[in-house]
Amino acid sequence: KDSSPPLYYKPLEELCKIRSPAKTPDGRPFKELPGLVSELPHNEQGYFGRIALALLLLGHGYPDECHDLVLPLSWPEDMHIAYGPSVYHQASESVRAYSSYAHCLVHRKEAFHV
């Protein structure tokens, strides 16, 4: 039996309001999460940082936040719930593979609610 709640399918900014006053795994308030992600560079290193952060959030029970962070890296079209526009076509094959794997993990966890 899975204890994970269903996904909200909301943008990161809305999720930060839903999660408040909860904290991210490193103890920051969720309202700081968009700023933290925005500080990551828009290159391969930054994309892998985004994937790592997304997986940490997933591991701590925040699948929506993980989903929003990896969606622009793993999906070729812009989505309203993604944090930022799609960079799928600019990202390396490795970034697309790892972000797609993280994306799959989110939906695997959601499977009990679909």
Image: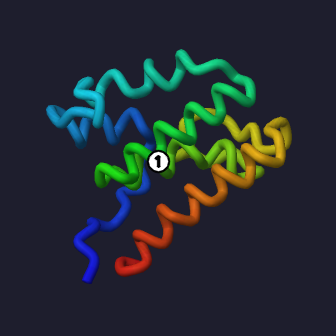
- The amino acid type of the residue labelled 1 equals Leu
Q: Residue at x 58, y 46 (%)?
A: 70
Q: Is 60 situated above or below 44? A: below
Q: Specify the farthest residue to the left.
A: 21
Snapshot colouring: rainbow
Please give the residue where the numbered disc 1 appears in the rendered image. Answer: 55
- The picture places residue 74, in percent across and down from the top left corner, at 69, 51
Tell me the quarter of the picture where residue 23 sits.
Answer: top left
**Which residue is nearer to you in this view: 107 or 84?**
107
Q: Residue at x 54, y 36 (%)?
A: 83
**Nearer to the camera, 84 or 2:** 2
Residue at the bottom extreme? 1
Q: Quadrant of the C terminus?
A: bottom left
Label 1, residues with CA under 10 Å away: few <14, some 14-19, many ≥20: many
Kind of element beneath mark 1:
helix
Is 87 on the left-hand or right-hand side of 7? right
Image location of residue 32, percent across then percent down: 34, 21
x and y percent of residue 14 in the render? 35, 38
Which image quadrant is residue 6 in? bottom left
**In the depicted structure, whether residue 19 falls above or below residue 102:** above
Q: What residue is drawn where x is 53% and y is 20%?
A: 38
Relative to 63, 42 lies left or right? right
- In depth, the one of 65 and 14 nearer the eye is 65
Residue 89 vs 38, above or below: the answer is below
- Relative horizontal placement of residue 45, taking residue 102 as reference (left or right): right
- Look at the image and tell me in which quarter the N terminus lies: bottom left
Image coordinates of residue 36 in percent, x first then y, are 44, 21
Q: Indicate left or right for 35 with 16 as reference.
A: right
